[in-house]
Amino acid sequence: MVDIFLDSGFEEDVIYTDVSGIPKTIKAIVNRQELKQTVRNIKSSDNTNMRLYDVEIEISTDATDGISSIKIKTDKVALKRKIGDTLDTTMSVDGILYNDSGAWKLGLK
C-alpha cells in the first residue's frame, strides 16, 4: 500500500499529529466534498455507502511512511481544506471509516 501512496500522483502532503503532540508529514489521498458531517452511516438507494464527512483522507498504515495507530477525537490533521487554499486547516480525526493491512480511511471534522 505504501507504494500506491508514493506513486499514484493523487496524494498530497498533510501534517498528522497524534496523541504525543509530535507532528509528522505524510502522504494522503484527500477527498473533499461540500456535505454536512453526520455521525451515522448512510446508505443510498442502491445500498452503497455515501460520504459521511466533508473531508476524508486515506493514509498508509505503515509506521514509517504513514500512521500505524489512530486515536479518534484526539489525533489532528493539518491540510488544505479546499483546493486553492494557501493555509492549512487543522481538523480532528472524527472517525475511522475503514482500515485494512495497508490503509486507513478517516473522516475529519
Image: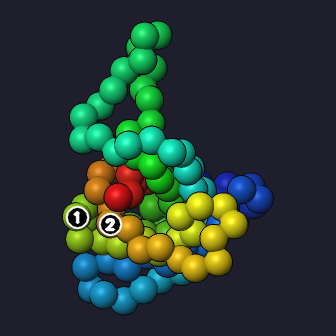
Above or below for 97 versus 1: above
Judging from the image, what secondary structure is the residue with disc 1 in? loop
The colour scheme used to paint the residues is: rainbow
Count every numbered label the image shows and give the total: 2
Q: Residues within 10 Å of mark 2 (few under 14, many from 20)?
A: some
Q: Position of residue 102 (x, y in %)?
A: 49, 53
Above or below for 67 versus 38: below
**Which residue was labeled with disc 2?**
92
Compared across the picture, whether 15 is left or right of 12 comes to left
Quadrant of image for the C terminus: bottom left
First along the sequence among labels 2 and 1: 1
Q: Which of 58 and 90 is in front in this view?
A: 90
Quadrant of image for the N terminus: bottom right
Above or below for 63 versus 43: below
Q: Amino acid under label 1?
A: Lys
Residue that appears at 63% across and 70% down: 85
Circles 2 and 1 in contact, beta carbons < 8 Å: yes
Q: Which of 30 and 8 is in front in this view?
A: 30
Residue that appears at 30% across and 87% down: 21
Q: Amino acid under label 2?
A: Ser
For the question of whether residue 101 can be seen, the reply is: no
Residue that appears at 42% across and 86% down: 23
Q: Nearer the viewer, residue 38 or 105?
A: 38
Judging from the image, what secondary structure is the residue with disc 2 in? strand
**Which residue was labeled with disc 1?**
73
Q: Where is residue 38 in the image (x, y as percent from the top left)?
A: 29, 40
